[in-house]
Image: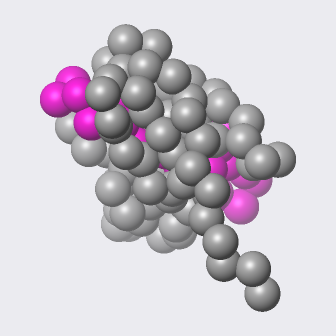
Amino acid sequence: MNTTMQEYNVGSLEDFLPRIGRVVELGGVQLALFRTSEGTIYALENRSPHPKGGPLAEGMVSGCYLYDPLYDWKIDLRSGEVQAPDRGIVKTYPVTETAGQIKVCL
């Protein structure tokens, strides 16, 4: 099993508008990246954990939570966990910022 992680440059901090999702495809994986009002960037798989699926990039961000645009599920951007009473998890990816450049590890 290959556990090597690769780091991808996805742009500068200014490329990500606060509270607006942006879709990025890396290594065959479609990600939804979000910048919070505080300036932190999170990367999640761009797929709702709801049984019917759907994209997450169009969701609304409030604090460290994302509200699924189709089902209004509340998802923690830090862990990917869906908040009660709903259940599920979204895969999250590590994000780093170096000299204003944003990088995602896959």
Where does the image place residue 103, in percent across and percent down from the top left? Answer: 48, 40
The answer to whether residue 28 is left or right of residue 70 is: right
Q: Considering only vertical position in the picture, is 52 above or below 59?
A: below
Q: Considering only vertical position in the picture, is 55 above or below 92?
A: above
Residue extending furthest right? 28
The answer to whether residue 59 is left or right of residue 3 is: left
| Figure quadrant of the N terminus | bottom right
Q: Residue shown at 37%/63% (left/top)?
A: 79
Closer to us: 34 or 87: 34
Where does the image place residue 70, in percent across and percent down from the top left? Answer: 60, 36
| Figure quadrant of the C terminus | bottom right
Where does the image place residue 17, in percent across and percent down from the top left? Answer: 38, 14
Which image quadrant is residue 19 in?
Answer: top left
Residue extending furthest left? 38
The answer to whether residue 104 is left or right of residue 53 is: left
Where does the image place residue 35, in percent across and percent down from the top left? Answer: 35, 29
Q: Number of marks in the image? A: 0
Start-end of magenta stretch: 35-60
Say if residue 105 shows up in the picture: yes
Closer to us: 42 or 14: 14
Which image quadrant is residue 37 in?
Answer: top left
Q: Is residue 95 magenta?
A: no
